[in-house]
């Protein structure tokens, strides 16, 4: 398509009518934002590098060969080989030679830290020294879990990405099946695998950033609309190639734009500071390939979302993540029986981040009643590794049930946002030190996030790439939340994870197979002898001492790992009881019944999966 499809109120069902866009019998319609690239020729026989001509000044961040997302030309850098500073970084020693002849406009720094993933483009190269684009670099080092001084710098993974010269550089990542693009020359290159001939494959280059916008406008919401049996493919979100880069916070959320207020000195803000807090209510979500906002009674059933260069589906996000510019207001949305795979980002983001998302100023903005059921989600986060399979920030009423989620670098399911800062009374301690409530109110009313059911999901080979993630992950107060009868297998990091400010979460009858922590409750710091109602202990190390993660229950779960982490103590009303350790994984009959029942029960064509 030359441009996205846009549906507004006149395109929905009027009155009680309902409009359905559905695949014809035996048809396989594809809504694609891609261009097939042909005319491949062997450019370098020794390296098996092929090239093809494309229109000049066209750029993309993804390339698909026979449906597989290829890796951009990449060189891995050891932490000892790089020194960061306020303007960028310097490569030390022989590794600096890789920058010879490299154009700054094609070079990008990529760093995976404890829970975040950052992409910052270069603006100038001076020998082994690289100056990075601003404000992207500033927003990365005045952040939480920063690139220059993260929470676990020894575990950081650092890459340089993009230039075609890297196709000939050997690194531990391997050098085949990588690609690069030179927009000014109008040319694209693939370093193919052994005896692979790209001219015999279908190569698709994405040209669009959005495929489908379903949105109301100033006249009101769009209503009564369905899409069934359609494939959505071939997009590329170009935001990280801008001066903003991708200064990620967590779970696909990032900082963009110029700093607010006084600049923080380099190195002074590695775990949040005033500059960081000043931007909190301006944080951004990745715009999805398919977007739904200001919409009521919308369903997407038995569709395929594949080969997409960002998040696949955005529901009720903020206006900055919507092509229409209209935000939030998603009501009675059903996402059922779909297949999500081969995605640069996450599968589904539901809800916004800003004030109207958690405390809507009028009912038209309220997100409510979202059902995500019987979907298959696999092979996501290929570029934006921090993205979750399903991430819901603020919604009144969510059901996430009978989904199969596998092969995710970060959390397969993450619900809640805000670390408790937007909950009644807010948080204390570092909030005062960082000046958080100079930039936002301390709310006296609860957020709209409540009544979340996460049940009967099968989560396999998940949270692989980050130490601080969860198989099922929560943030902030979510009253009425029940997480039951899910099967988690092969979970890295933490399996069941209530992070800072989580309250009113109940885990029951889940089966947890992990080599890590089967249960984690993060209160921000260990609880001290300070009275639970205390706000701040100036004698301490500058950490929180008042409890914030409270009133959570883990009862009647089966688990093979012995380790529990965090503050599961009666003083905080965090209760762990009647759980069963099954070290040898010979699950009892009731646990086996839950395992058998978990996962999707319908395939994407509507036929029974099991």
Image (spheres, rainbow, N blue to C red):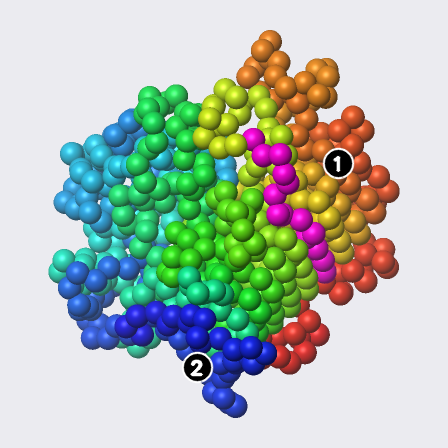
| Callout 2: SS | loop
Q: Foreground residue, 274 or 29?
A: 274
Q: Residue at x 42, y 70 (%)?
A: 8
| Callout 1: SS | loop
Q: Is residue 582 above or below residue 529?
A: below
Q: Residue at x 47, y 64 (%)?
A: 220
Q: Is residue 221 left or right of residue 40?
A: right
Single out the residue that lies furthest toward the bottom: 25
Q: Is residue 397 left or right of residue 363?
A: right
Q: Earlier in the sequence, mark 1 or mark 2?
A: 2
Q: How many marks?
A: 2
Could you tell me which quadrant the N terminus lies in?
bottom left
Q: Is residue 459 magenta?
A: yes
Mark 2: few, some, or many residues within 10 Å (few <14, many ≥20)?
few
Question: Could you say which quadrant of the image residue 586 lies in?
Answer: bottom right
Q: Foreground residue, 608 or 260?
A: 260
Instruction: Examine the rendering and report whether any part of residue 117 can be seen.
Output: no
Q: Position of residue 353 (x, y in %)?
A: 49, 45
Q: Residue at x 22, y 34 (%)?
A: 131
Q: Residue at x 41, y 41 (%)?
A: 282
Q: Position of residue 425 (x, y in %)?
A: 62, 30
Could you tell me which quadrant the C terminus lies in?
bottom right
**Which dot, 1 or 2, sits closer to the camera?**
1
Q: Position of residue 456 (x, y in %)?
A: 72, 60
Q: Is residue 199 above or below residue 550?
A: below
Which label sits on residue 223? none
Give the magenta-colored segment's residue range.
442-463
Q: Is residue 578 magenta?
A: no
Mark 1: few, some, or many residues within 10 Å (few <14, many ≥20)?
some
Which label sits on residue 551? 1
Q: Position of residue 23 (x, y in %)?
A: 49, 84
Residue ID for mark 2: 29
């Amino acid at each position: 398509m030359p441009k996205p499809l846009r549906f507004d109120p006149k395109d929905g069902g009027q009155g009680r009518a309902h409009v359905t866009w559905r695949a014809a019998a035996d048809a396989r319609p594809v809504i694609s934002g891609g261009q097939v690239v042909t005319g491949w020729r062997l450019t370098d026989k020794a390296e098996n590098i092929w090239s093809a001509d494309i229109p000049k000044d066209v750029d993309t961040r993804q390339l698909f060969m026979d449906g597989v997302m290829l890796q951009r030309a990449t060189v891995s850098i050891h932490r000892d080989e790089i020194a960061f500073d306020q303007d960028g970084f310097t490569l030390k020693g022989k590794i600096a030679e890789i920058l010879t002849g490299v154009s700054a406009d094609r070079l990008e720094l990529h760093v995976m830290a404890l829970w975040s993933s950052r992409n910052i483009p270069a603006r100038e190269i001076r020998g082994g020294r690289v100056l990075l684009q601003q404000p992207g670099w500033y927003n990365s080092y005045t952040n939480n879990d920063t690139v220059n001084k993260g929470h676990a710098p020894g575990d950081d993974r650092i890459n340089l990405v993009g230039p075609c010269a890297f196709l000939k550089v050997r690194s531990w990542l391997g050098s085949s099946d990588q690609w690069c693009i030179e927009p000014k020359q109008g040319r694209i290159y693939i370093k193919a695998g052994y005896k692979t001939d790209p001219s015999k494959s279908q190569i698709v280059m994405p040209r669009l950033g959005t495929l489908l916008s379903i949105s109301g406008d100033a006249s009101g919401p769009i209503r009564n609309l369905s899409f069934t049996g359609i494939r959505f493919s071939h997009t590329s979100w170009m935001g990280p190639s801008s001066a903003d880069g991708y200064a990620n916070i967590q779970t696909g959320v990032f900082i963009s734009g110029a700093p607010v207020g006084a600049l923080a000195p380099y190195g002074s803000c590695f775990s949040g500071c005033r500059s960081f807090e000043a931007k909190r209510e301006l944080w951004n979500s990745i715009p999805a390939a398919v977007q739904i906002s200001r919409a009521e009674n919308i369903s997407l059933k038995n569709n395929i979302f594949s080969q997409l260069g960002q998040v696949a589906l955005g529901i009720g996000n903020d206006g900055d993540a919507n092509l229409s510019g209209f935000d939030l207001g998603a009501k009675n949305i059903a996402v059922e029986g779909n297949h999500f795979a081969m995605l640069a980002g996450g599968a589904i983001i539901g809800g916004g981040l800003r004030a109207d998302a958690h405390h809507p100023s009028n009912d038209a903005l309220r997100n409510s009643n979202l059902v995500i059921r019987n979907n298959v989600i696999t092979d996501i986060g290929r570029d934006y590794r921090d993205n979750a399979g399903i991430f819901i920030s603020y919604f009144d009423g969510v059901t996430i049930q009978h989904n199969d989620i596998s092969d995710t670098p970060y959390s397969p399911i993450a619900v809640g946002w805000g670390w408790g800062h937007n909950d009644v009374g807010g948080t204390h301690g570092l909030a005062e030190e960082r000046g958080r409530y100079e930039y936002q109110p301390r709310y006296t009313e609860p957020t709209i996030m409540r009544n979340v059911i996460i049940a009967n999901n099968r989560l396999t080979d998940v949270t692989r790439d980050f130490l601080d993630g969860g198989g099922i992950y929560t943030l902030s107060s979510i009253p009425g939340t029940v997480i039951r009868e899910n099967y988690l297998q092969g979970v890295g990091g933490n399996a069941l994870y209530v992070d800072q400010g989580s309250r009113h979460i109940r885990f029951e009858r889940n089966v947890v197979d992990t080599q890590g922590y089967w249960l984690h409750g993060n209160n921000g710091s260990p609880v001290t002898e300070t009275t639970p109602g205390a706000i701040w202990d100036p004698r301490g190390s500058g950490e929180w001492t008042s409890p914030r993660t409270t009133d959570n229950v883990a009862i009647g779960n089966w688990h093979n790992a012995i380790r529990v982490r965090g503050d599961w103590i009666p003083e905080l009303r965090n209760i762990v009881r009647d759980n069963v350790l099954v070290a040898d994984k010979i699950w009892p009959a009731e646990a086996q019944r839950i395992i058998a029942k978990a996962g999707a029960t319908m395939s994407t064509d509507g036929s029974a999966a099991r």
